[in-house]
Amino acid sequence: MTMPATISLSALPNSLPDCPNARLSLFAIRRMGGHGLADARAAHALFTAFGEGFRRPLMLIRALMADMAGAAANPIAIAPCCCPRVTHAEAALLTVLSRVETAPETARFLLGDMLSLRRVDGVLASAAAVAVAFADEGRPICA
């Protein structure tokens, strides 16, 4: 059974990002969101991309996912890994990861809207750590 095009476009309004680093982070987020923080495929994808430096981004994405899950007032919609489109929440999170260093207030507002919270400082710090870990390894996340 397939969904009508109008339903799938409203549930998944955005295309996948062009940035390969954003796609990598999205893949890890989707795998951990759907299969748990210890998902081997997410770890393998980060190992393949980062080589020996994979541990820091992996642990920080795990921490970010745990922080978001613990702080969110509502469920966060995550699409399956094979989905060629992105949910509102995924698009917001990728925007947060790409702007947390250059536009922290924008990132704070987006994260607050996504989590339905006013105070998102802890989760924002986790997102900043993920963004810095990717950038330090030469893989900045761009929107």
Image (cartoon, helix red, strand yellow):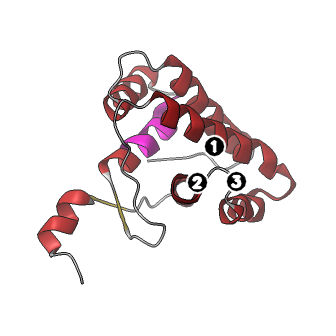
Callout 2, which amino acid? Met
* Figure check: 71 above or below 2: above
User: For this view, does 87 lie left or right of residue 55?
Assistant: left
Q: Residue at x 42, y 28 (%)?
A: 107
Marks 1 and 3, Cα distance to the nearest angstrom?
A: 11 Å
Which residue is under mark 3?
38
User: For this view, does 109 lie left or right of residue 98?
Assistant: left
* Figure check: 68 above or below 80: above
Picture coordinates of residue 8, whole percent (x, y): 22, 67
Marks 2 and 1, Cα distance to the nearest angstrom?
A: 9 Å
Residue 93 covered by magenta stretch = yes
Report if the CB atoms under discs 2 and 1 are less than 8 Å apart.
Answer: yes
Picture coordinates of residue 55, whole percent (x, y): 80, 47
Callout 3, which amino acid? Ala
Element assignment for label 3: loop
Residue 87 covered by magenta stretch = no
Q: Which of the marked residues, 2 or 1, is nearer the chain's N terminus?
A: 2
* Figure check: 118 above or below 100: above
Q: Which of the marked residues, 1 or 3, is nearer the chain's N terminus?
A: 3
Q: Residues within 10 Å of mark 3 (few under 14, many from 20)?
A: few
Which residue is under mark 1?
61
Q: Which of the marked residues, 3 or 2, is nearer the chain's N terminus?
A: 2
Q: Main secondary structure of the magenta part?
A: helix
Q: Which residues are magenta?
A: 92-100
